[in-house]
Image: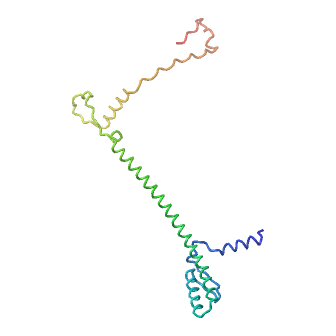
């Protein structure tokens, strides 16, 4: 079970304004003339107006009191605006870093592309005809089809394959007792070849 102290602390933390929403948040300020409701800027303006009115009526104590209330909200507002500005600057810095990284990557890609285009060895090469090959047999009047080309290519591939290694000779099987026994006609067992 939670103690009452932890509940009261949590309750107090909930009422504390965060930096981001203070600028537009509506406050209820309990001043000497009653409640003043509005955003911090509206409350500041209202207390400044009340301080001027008190000064005009020669009430220096009330004027000072209103000025202190206005100063309190002015400090809250300036602190919230400072936090917002710091957050905005941090976000801009991160955006600049991301953009610089993208620019670097783009420049590297362009350099690689330019190098690839400048290096003739890496550029795609056109097909070159081999004129040193023997001339084909005279035309037979038949049309060359893809199937006949494939057969010719397969035949040339077969010629280009390296010869197979000869197989190692097999070891002779161990003779079983039934095979070693002499045959009834008295012949000796034949040697396996």
Looking at the rendered image, the quarter that the N terminus falls into is: bottom right
- Quarter-wise, where is residue 5 in the image? bottom right
Looking at the image, which residue is at 37% across and 30% down? 157
Q: From what the image shows, is residue 33 above or below residue 105?
A: below
Percent coordinates x, y for residue 149 in the rendering: 31, 35
Question: Which residue occupies the foreground of this view, 152 or 189?
Answer: 152
Q: Pick out the residue farthest to the top.
A: 186
Q: In this view, does 34 lie to the left or right of 110?
A: right
Which residue is drawn at the image coordinates 63% and 14% (left, top)? 178
Q: In which quarter of the image is residue 27?
A: bottom right
Q: How is the image coloured?
A: rainbow
Residue 130 pos. (x, y %): 27, 32
The one of 143 and 122 positioned closer to us in this rendering: 122
Residue 96, above or below 110? below
Judge left or right: residue 51 versus residue 106.
right
Q: Say which residue appears at 61% left-offset and 14% top-offset.
A: 175
* Image coords of residue 38 (percent x, y): 58, 83
- Give whichever of 43, 20 is nearer the camera: 43
* Horizontal arrangement in the rendering, residue 91 relative to residue 155 (left or right): right
Q: At which x and y percent is residue 148?
A: 31, 34
Report the front residue among 3 and 127: 3
The residue lying at 35 percent from left, 47 percent from top is 114
Q: Is residue 166 above or below residue 113?
A: above
């Amino acid at each position: 079970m939670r103690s009452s102290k932890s509940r009261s602390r949590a309750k107090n933390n909930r009422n504390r304004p965060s930096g981001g929403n203070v600028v537009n948040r509506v406050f209820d300020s309990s001043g000497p003339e009653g409640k003043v409701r509005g955003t911090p800027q509206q409350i500041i303006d209202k207390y400044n107006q009340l301080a001027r009115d008190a000064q005009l009526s020669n009430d220096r104590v009330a004027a000072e009191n209103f000025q202190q209330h206005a100063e309190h909200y002015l400090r809250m507002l300036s602190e919230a605006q400072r936090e917002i500005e710091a957050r905005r600057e941090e976000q801009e810095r991160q955006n600049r870093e991301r953009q610089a990284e993208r620019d670097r990557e783009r420049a590297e890609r362009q350099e690689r592309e330019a190098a690839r285009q400048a290096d003739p060895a890496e550029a795609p090469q056109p097909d070159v005809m081999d004129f040193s090959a023997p001339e084909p047999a005279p035309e037979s009047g038949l049309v060359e089809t893809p199937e006949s080309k494939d057969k010719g290519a397969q035949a040339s591939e077969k010629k280009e394959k390296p010869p197979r290694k000869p197989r190692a000779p097999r070891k002779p099987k161990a003779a079983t007792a039934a095979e070693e026994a002499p045959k009834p006609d008295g012949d000796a067992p034949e040697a396996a070849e």
